[in-house]
Image (spheres, coloured by chain):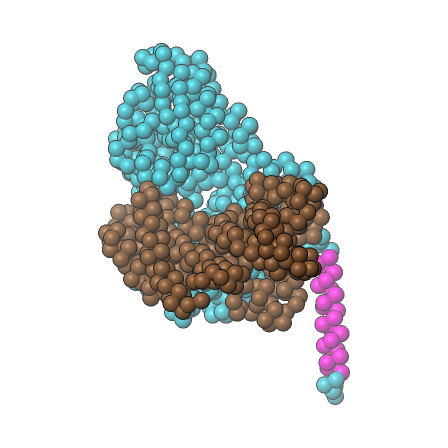
Chain colours: A brown, B cyan
Amino acid sequence: MRFGFIVERLLQLVPVLLGVSLVVFLMMTLTPGDPVEIMLGDQRVTPEQKESLRHDMGLDLPATERFVHFVANAVKGDFGRSFFHRRPVADVIAERLPATLELTIVAMLIALAVGIPLGVLAAVRRGSLIDKAATVISLIGTSMPGFWFGIMLILFFAVYLGWMPVSGRIDLEFEVPRITGMYLIDSVLSGRLDAFLNALRHIVMPAITLGLAMAALLMRVTRTSMIEVLQQDYIVFAEAKGLSRSRVLLRHALKNALIPTVTVAALETGYLLGGNTIVETVFGWPGLARVIVEGVFSRDYPLVQAGVLVIAVIYVMVNFAADVLYTILNPRIKL
Amino acid sequence: MMNIRSLFLIDRAVASRLFFAGLLAVVASGALCADVRVGFTQDALTLDPANHRKRETETVIRNLYDAVMTQTSKSQTVPEIAESVRQIDPVTYEVKLRKGVKFHSGDEMTADDVKFTYDRLTKDKAMGGQTSPRQSLVGPLVSTDVVDRYTVRFKLKEPWPVFERMLPAQQVVSRKFVEKVGNDGMATQANGTGPFKLVEWRRGDSIIMERFADYYGGAPAIPPVGAAKADRLIFKIIPENASRMAALMAGEVDVVNEVPVFAINTIERSGKAKVVKANGTRTFFIALNVTKPPFSDVRVRQAANHAVDKKLLIDRLLGNAATPVAGVLSPESFGYKKGLREYEFDPNKAKKLLADAGFAKGIDVTLDTEGAFKDQAEAIASMLTKVGIRTKVQVWEGAVLTPIWRADKKERDMYFSSWGSGALDPTGIFVPTLKTKDRGNSSGYSNPKVDKLLDAAESEMNTTKRADMYHEAERIVTEEAPWIFLWVPQDIYAISTRLRGWEPGTDSRINMHRAYLVK
């Protein structure tokens, strides 16, 4: 991998992020609804008081000036102050982002751990009962609405069986020293096994809910590409050489079949980050996606702009990581 | 001479006797001083009492901070950290503070803190260069002066009869603490005089508080007085309705707010929890655009009122959790009186009124609503359609719809709307929604006689005369029917059958000072 490639990709981030900022800014500005009116609600207020609030929010400036200010400050890491939280946006995001990242990562791990082996198995045993069962499971996984599935999990495992907690990230009794903000990692780093297990209990249901559809999709993609690869001449050749079945499958077939799976997994990160909105609401998961949605409804411009920007950065970085992974899976791919 | 060892032994014996006596008392009363957990829809935006305009945020804060006055569950305003509040003249109020009220830091709360609190609210740019968004909530208050260590005087620019009713919404902060942590520090830290002190705020997840042992006891008018009964109070943030109800059923929380109507029966049948209700603070109505036909004709507006079967709607759609209103005011509000014109459900009368207005063949109109009220709006639309007011429902996002209807020029027909007044005083709802060109006057209604009555009532200090003025204004308004008068929904909560010491109030707050659990 060329060093120049990395620099090139990082430079590509600039127009992407500028574009994202502009689109979000325009969407928020052009959508009717005045943050000052929303904040004041029904209570009495004088025109002067309204203007003073508008000034505090920076809404008395022309839109172009507001956008330039936002970009100029964002470059320095200053995203302004949230209209409604009345604190620096960076603080609000820093508090909430780790929860979203943690949930996304665990959901992705579940999706990969379930989707890929099932896909391989279905391809190898094509037409068998396992293949048919996997197809049915994947159909259910893609077609079941996340919020409904989440509520069903809660009703069965939390209310009926009482095995799982309904909501939250960890029980109140546990205090995990903040290192990354991700409880699973922080509890391991600080040697707190009890806290780790408790955090794990909390994340299981939301992560399954979030990762289910992705697992189904990955299973379908892996199955299809695996079937295709298994019909290639080099697989027949490898088998003819007398290599063991498992070696042929894992070293020769799966490695090549995984390239489309990696592409889909990277693209699906966007879905996971977006899907967080629903899962975070259903499971009371204190993540960033929920705050952004609340920000959209209350027209908290700085919060929404910065939040979407952060999610865009994550998305671009994950896809960048996928590009790097291609070269590992298939060294003939040159970047 | 007693040696140290024997002293220690005696002390231990006394201590253990006291411990068991205490334990027995607790067991006898059935009280279990454990955690009380509230499953709550929204996290606090900030913990600074002066830097928000959000009802849910205030609900959390009021367990940490007390105010000069508070409100009983029956919506009476009574002294809290004040010993007394006395009106000296139409624009001056004198507050005598209780002695020995402590902040969580241990510092005594004095008149200087009250002055600092109100200056922070009223002075421009008093909060790190920004003005408090709550400034308008203290109306014409211009200055707060310290008379002595325990006495302050509030000076208003003009008489404002609701001043006392607005005091519960402003919690007193410590000058020393604010100067120490700054305005940004106030957003995440708390040092109030309330029954609970902050332990930890896990943003978006929970707010954990514990009993403040040195609490002065709370408002004497709301017994029992004393420290909080629960060891800890936890607000657990669960935005999704079904999950919040599930948390109650699973025993993870003891109180939940905003219980959806569909869940009432399930909760009642569970045996683990029960539903409790209190009249809310919002009046629901349909604003009829009186500035253009067809609703510029009073007969069409009256026809619309006769066409709606409120009782049926409340029974079927609102789970019987709403009180129908004939006019503007909630039954809990100051100035509420019976004897207004009631528009009974009478489709024939509605058709006749419509024909009298020249619309025998009916009219075609649009009813605007937010998504949350779509079902109610559609049910009303079908009732209106049956009498010839053929109504199409259009669903909007609130932030888009509100400015359309608050604009000076009214171009649309009907608006399913509501207006809240936390202080439950007519000035908070009547003036903004029905005074000529006021900010929430969606229907475009204008009647100089009503304006005059509302203006006069704003500064009338005699409560009887003031109530009569509002009643007269309400009588005129109900005759002229700029709205389809609907209902005041109740706030619906569900509580564990183990919870004692709390009942929902008409101010929609959850003050858990006296709440505790039994086995």
In the depicted structure, whether residue A96 falls above or below residue A281: below
- Residue at (68%, 47%) from the top-left corner? A125
Q: Is residue A257 magenta?
A: no
Camera-side residue: B55 or A76?
A76
Secondary structure character of the magenta stretch overall? helix
- Residue at (36%, 11%) from the top-left corner? B360
- Residue at (37%, 60%) from the top-left corner? A13
Q: Position of residue A241 (x, y in %)?
A: 66, 60
Quarter holding residue A43: top left
Q: Position of residue A103 (x, y in %)?
A: 55, 56
Q: Is residue B100 visible?
A: no
Q: Position of residue A138 (x, y in %)?
A: 61, 44
- Residue at (46%, 40%) from the top-left corner? B281
Write the start and end of the magenta stretch as one range.
B6-27
Q: Position of residue A332 (x, y in %)?
A: 49, 61
In the depicted structure, whether residue B311 falls above or below residue A17: above
* Quadrant (top left, top right, bottom left, bottom right) of the N terminus of chain B: bottom right
Q: Is residue B340 visible?
A: yes
Q: Is residue B15 magenta?
A: yes
